[in-house]
Image (cartoon, coloured by chain):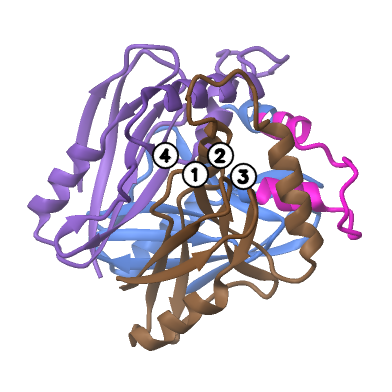
Chain colours: A purple, B brown, C blue
Amino acid sequence: MKTIELRTRSRTEFVPIGDAVAELVAASGVREGCCLVFSPHTTAGITINENADPDVRTDMLKELNSVIPFKDDYLHTEGNSAAHIKASLMGSSATVPVSGGALRLGTWQTLYFCEFDGPRTREVWVQVISG
Amino acid sequence: MKTIELRTRSRTEFVPIGDAVAELVAASGVREGCCLVFSPHTTAGITINENADPDVRTDMLKELNSVIPFKDDYLHTEGNSAAHIKASLMGSSATVPVSGGALRLGTWQTLYFCEFDGPRTREVWVQVISG
Amino acid sequence: MKTIELRTRSRTEFVPIGDAVAELVAASGVREGCCLVFSPHTTAGITINENADPDVRTDMLKELNSVIPFKDDYLHTEGNSAAHIKASLMGSSATVPVSGGALRLGTWQTLYFCEFDGPRTREVWVQVISG
């Protein structure tokens, strides 16, 4: 298992990690299988979405922050319950096919680390599975 | 890795693909492991839900379209930000156990391709992993 | 593939299953790979989130039940469409890295079975994949 370390800059932010994951897959020597990209945090998730227009990320964050408000009479005294909920909505991981020795994302896709309680120092765990 | 091609008919639609995936698993010869069912698109996802009453799908789409409105002052000029968000809420993939050489869904489950920006010609990538 | 059986006590409830899954992984003998934790139900899901303060679970359930109301002019006559939708929002499964022979969750993470239409007797299917 490999670890990617990253530093987020904002309270909520989508950080592209597709290139870093693709490099780990290429270096793994696995030809056919899948790649598990996992967030070991409870206030951040992983998702796959558009790699081109950054407005898509902005819209996604704005809408998620609107549907799950930062304050909503939450009990959890740390004050970041909204981040926990958004992490579960995006999910703690993404699994991507590996074929021909490469990570196989669609043309317009990349992987994102989804920060919902930043800025923080974070990790992403990457496990390449030979099928 | 195998590809399922499909044509969606509506702007938002859940297309059942469980039977097609089960056939690919049976043909793969894998006895124990899992099956990764992956959407290479950014405005469509994959989910698992009820295979019996089609009203469930209708209710799911209606509610998702209500929570994430088609128009909501999005910046992305293509006008389909809602589809990007719903794709990430459902997720780009589902992973299903393979055991005894067969795809193992629950009695009431099937796999759905979730179209959120149709109608379009789409692909689903299927990777069967031997464990 | 192994099965965990559990009994939920409320209409909506997050049941911690991380310890039970970790035991199955340790017993499997798999050193490197991943573990697929799968709900074979259509009104319950699996998620990963905070293992410490139980208020987080309470906040998550309250917010999910607020965003997806129990009643909202749904067509499905069983009356549990909200549960189907929440199951897909959390997802039917979680996949967790296995490394050094152990389930590798983050410090503050555990796995939850997400009941959205209880109380019921439920199953979780666990497939450990050697990578």
- Give the image location of residue A76, x and y in percent: 63, 19
Question: Toward which corner of the image does residue B79 lie, by quadrant?
Answer: top right
Mark 4 in CB contact with mark 2 (< 8 angstroms): no
Residue A57 seen from this side: yes
Between the C-alphas of marks 3 and 4, the distance is 13 Å
Could you classify mark 1 by the number of other residues whose Cα lies within 10 Å: few (under 14), some (14-19), or many (20 or more)?
A: many
Of circles 2 and 3, the one toward us is 2
Between the C-alphas of marks 1 and 3, the distance is 16 Å
Mark 1 in CB contact with mark 4 (< 8 angstroms): no
Between the C-alphas of marks 2 and 3, the distance is 15 Å
Mark 1 in CB contact with mark 2 (< 8 angstroms): yes
**Location of mark 4 (residue):** A47
At 57% across and 54% down in the image, what residue appears? B119
Between the C-alphas of marks 1 and 4, the distance is 13 Å
**Location of mark 3 (residue):** C89
Which region shows up in magenta? Answer: C60-87
**Location of mark 2 (residue):** B83
